[in-house]
Amino acid sequence: MKIGCVKEIKKHEYRVGCTPASVAAYVNEGHEFYIESGAGEGSGFSDQEYKDAGAVIVADPKDIWATVDMMIKVKEPLESEYPLFREGLILYTYLHLAADKALVDALVKYKVTGVAYETLSDHHELPLLKPMSEVAGKLAVQEGARCLEKPQGGSGVLLGGVPGVKRGKVVIIGGGAVGINAAKAAVGMGADVVILDKSINRLAYLDDIFGNELQTLYSTDFEIQRQCDEADLVIGAVLIPGAAAPKLVKREYLKTMKKGAVIVDVAVDQGGCIETTKATYHDNPTFIIDDVVHYCVANMPGAVPRTSTLALTNATLAYGLQIATKGIENAIDSPVLSTAINTYKGHVTFQAVAEATGKEYKSLNELK
Ligand SMILES: NC(=O)C1=CN([C@@H]2O[C@H](COP(=O)(O)OP(=O)(O)OC[C@H]3O[C@@H](n4cnc5c(N)ncnc54)[C@H](O)[C@@H]3O)[C@@H](O)[C@H]2O)C=CC1
Ligand SMILES: CC(=O)C(=O)O
Ligand SMILES: [Mg+2]
């Protein structure tokens, strides 16, 4: 198979879809690999390293889009890339389609096979979302702590406190991969930490892991509002795979929150779980509503690209090799790989995406 990787063009996105080690793995299995010159620079990989691994270095990304059977990326394509789509192209990347109707339309129009990292499900886990959720969970506390600083518009609370002065309170909504990593970072800083989830099994697991260092609470509207009232930092970390995030923090809750409190809505890529969320970028990551600082960057791991690219590609390589080796017709028969296919032959093939975007759903079986 011909496989390609282009430089990410989203603002301040420095990750890359493949490392030299992943290129070498594809080439060793007999595939051809094309990579855009400079694609790995932001993550610390030079063209020479890719060349040594067996890639062909290509100056113009358009030539790669026009040539390859499978394109491997990190973030969703942007509008300027839509005209480069072709019928039958396999696009292996984060897509987050529930929040991006224009991209759904383009993938359907050009009959691109959209293989979304974030919905690939293996043994009840989301192995291609997890590594970036681990990064984003830790970053959520790091960025949230910074937003609490007075010059950033925050209340001026230090999360860990000091002897004789109360610690800050961190409220994490959703105790999955983002939530547990946010909890590790917040507990590590010495904050007072509460985590809410709908899954009682998950709450039990978190309680076993953290013991008395973490307060677990069952997630209800009532409890979320009460916890937000007391919070210095709220972290939105819920997910219903493929679907638009439920709006759990209502606009009116902000009125009774502390002045200068901070909300980091990590779930922004699925539309956000805070009613007042709108996506921001690393160069201007925050805005303030009702004296509450909002941080809503949809590509948080892009800020730490060296760590993130390595963690992401560690996870994507094995499934990417399976797609390349089986071919897409066989991949759709795989119970695991099929969970990632959001669009195929001009149709939306993931139910929650169809529901969120008002599109007709067709099962992969109907399209064989
Ligand atoms: N902004 C960014 O840069 C990044 C965003 N993300 C996003 O973060 C979100 C969370 O991802 P993960 O932690 O990997 O998902 P996950 O599936 O591991 O965890 C989600 C948790 O939310 C819980 N949940 C669902 N409904 C809930 C409710 N009403 N109240 C409380 N908890 C509820 C689930 O039980 C689950 O434990 C996703 O939208 C993901 O795409 C992930 C990485 C980077
Ligand atoms: C998961 C995601 O959206 C990201 O890593 O940017
Ligand atoms: Mg207020």
Image: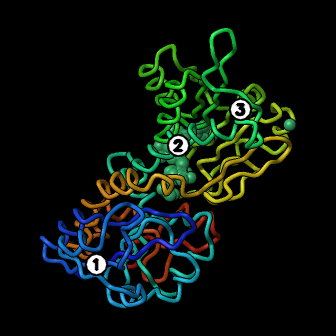
Q: Is residue 240 visible?
A: no
| Label placed on residue 139 | 2
**Foreground tag (3 vs 1):** 1
**Up-down: is 58 above or below 235?**
below
Label 1 and label 2: CA atoms lie apart by: 32 Å
The C terminus, quarter of image = bottom left
Residue 103, position in %: x, y? 57, 75
Residue 221, position in %: x, y? 73, 34
The kind of residue tagged 2 is Leu
**Foreground tag (1 vs 2):** 2
Q: Would the CB of label 2 be found within 8 Å of ligand 1?
A: yes
The N terminus, quarter of image = bottom left
Q: Would the CB of label 3 be found within 8 Å of ligand 1?
A: yes
Residue 339, position in %: x, y? 39, 61
| Label placed on residue 3 | 1
> Mark 1: which secondary structure?
strand
Q: Which residue is mark 3?
A: 224
Is label 1 in contact with label 2 (beta carbons under 8 Å)? no
> Mark 3: which secondary structure?
helix
Mark 3 and mark 1 lie on one chain; the one further toward the N terminus is: 1
Q: Quadrant of residue 366?
A: bottom left
The residue at the point 51 percent across, 80 percent down is 107
Callout 1: 10 Å neighbours few (<14), some, many (20+)? many
The kind of residue tagged 3 is Ile
